[in-house]
Image (cartoon, rainbow, N blue to C red):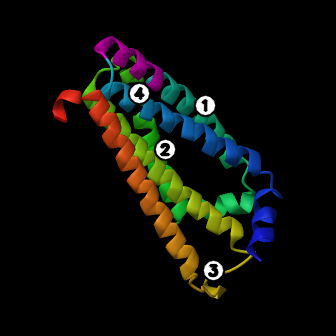
Amino acid sequence: RMEPALLAAWSGIGLLLPRFLHNFVGSLGITGIWILWIAAVRGQEEEATRGAKSGVSLALGASTVQVMIGFWYLLSLPGEVLKAIMTFHSLAAAGLVFGILMGVGMLFHLFLLFNDPGNTRLRWIATGLAAGTLLGMVTASEGLRQALLQKHFTLSDWIVHTQWGATLLFLALFLAGAGTVIWISKVAWEAHNPGQTE
């Protein structure tokens, strides 16, 4: 079964803690960027600037710590796995290099935003670089997952049976969630811009 293989691969080689922290602290950085955008589209100028600075501070601080955790995570990998992923044709290496380049650019623009939190152009650039960083790191994570699990099971040997009940339940919940988000966004927009809804 896949579950014992996952436990053997992740906990057996001491990757659970750095992997968890890498994901958790990274999510704080993205939260900071969300706060930056929320502050930019609501409130008075002074309040927006203060909120934007809080968001940038969180994103910059978390991303800086994330760099150290990322190195810890990388150095925690077994030697044979590290060799397997650090090759020119490796999915993990390509994603990692791309993610690091995007991350360095994001940190630079977050630093600039800290000194000028109201700068719209810097906000868009930092957000785009954050999205690129996420894309690169997710790609690297998938490549790493394949390298760690390849001796426990082969994906091509697995038979997939579609579970229509679970699929339909997911679609129903997805549509309900999307509708709720749209409704909340509409209410928030109308509350913030009462003159434009008449």
Q: What residue sits right under mark 3 in the picture?
A: 155
Q: Is residue 130 one of those drawn in magenta? A: no
Query: Viewer-proximal residue, 48 or 184?
Result: 184
> Residue 12: horizontal and vertical position, in percent?
83, 58
Identify the residue at image location x=42%, y=20%. 51
- In the picture, measured across the screen, residue 77 lies left or right of residue 22, that is right
The local secondary structure at tag 1 comes to: helix
Q: Which residues are magenta?
A: 44-55
As drawn, 3 above or below 158: above
- In the picture, measured across the screen, residue 74 lies left or right of residue 183, that is right
Which callout, 3 or 4, points at the residue further toward the start of the chain?
Answer: 4
Query: Viewer-proximal residue, 105 or 50?
Result: 50
- Residue 110 is tagged as 4
> Residue 170: horizontal and vertical position, in percent?
52, 68
Amino acid at pointer 4? Leu
- Residue 100 is tagged as 2
> Does residue 66 show up?
yes
Amino acid at pointer 2? Ile
- Residue 65 is tagged as 1
> Are the two marked residues, 4 and 1, in contact with CB atoms closer than 8 angstroms?
no
User: Distance of mark 3 from mark 4, alpha carbons?
Assistant: 40 Å
